[in-house]
Image (spheres, rainbow, N blue to C red):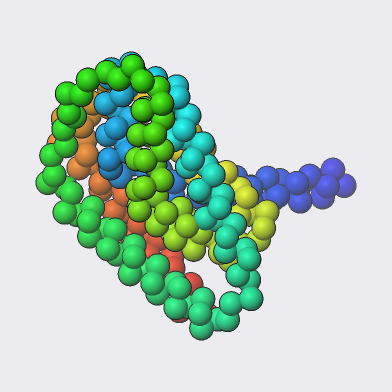
Amino acid sequence: MCWETERPLMLHFLSIMENIIFGFLTGVSLILALGPQNIFVIEQGLKRNYIFTITSICAFSDVLLIFLGVFIYHFFDFISLKVEIFLNIILVLFLLRFIRIKFKELKKNYKIENIKRSQNIKNIIFKTLGFTYLNPHVYSDTVFILGNLSKNFLLRDKFYFALGASIASIIFFYSLGYMSSLFAKFIKKHNIWTYINFFIIIFMTILVVYIIYDIYNR
């Protein structure tokens, strides 16, 4: 009787962890792609310039956009199978483009600019908001990729998937700000970014195969 009672609880727990881990890995593969926002956070971290404010704005904004992106598809449950397949095909093409960009970046060299430390917190807040909300990639990542990937999940599973992706963002941004010198050294090492880009390429390729398999079985 004890095992029969515990088994559903164990399966429920494993289901939760599966969605959290899937969300976390997807979030990591998206956020590791080095862009203007990440470079900005590293630069400010190196200058010890309002690190907590900057990282908090970036992390909170990412969490907000992740949950909006994941749950926005919940209001489109009425879409037909043909529309859903069309969205999946667009997502596959989008991910293939993302993979292509990552292949191009295998030979790219990154560098940190020698910026001056700003004493104006309002200026820093506006800059951080600009780098966050004026970045088109943040919407394509959160709404199109994360939202589209989880559109067929149960409502509960959507929450845990979004939670996993949010945990990845929170860990990443605070680490990026407070461990800037370490990340700055990584940026100078070409082989580090080669490994990171290979991880992103492999994970995104797995997602493409998963989506194609899902389309085929419809």
Residue 164 x %, y %: 54, 43
Q: Taking 82 as reference, is 24 above or below it?
A: above
Depth check, front residue: 52 or 98:
52
Q: Position of residue 77 (x, y in %)?
A: 63, 71
Q: Is residue 10 visible?
A: yes
Q: Is residue 177 above or below residue 7?
A: above
Which of the 4 image quadrants contains residue 44? top left
Q: Check the image and report above or below for 171 versus 143.
A: above
- Residue 195: image quadrant is top left
The location of residue 12, given as percent across then percent down, is 70, 49
Q: How far across and down, in percent of the image, does residue 202 sit?
A: 31, 54
Please tell me which residue is depicted at 49% across the width and 40% down the height of the picture: 61
Which residue ends up furthest to the bottom in the rendered image? Answer: 82
Name the image quarter holding residue 117: top left
Can residue 175 be seen here?
A: no
* Residue at 63 percent of width and 66 percent of height: 75
Given residues 124 and 51, the one toward you in this image is: 124
- At a point 54% along the width and 60% down the height, the residue shown is 150
- On screen, residue 43 above or below 157: above
Question: From the viewer's perspective, is 60 left or right of 182?
Answer: right
**Could you say which is closer to the camera, residue 92 or residue 133?**
133
**Mark count:** 0
**Residue extending farthest right:** 1
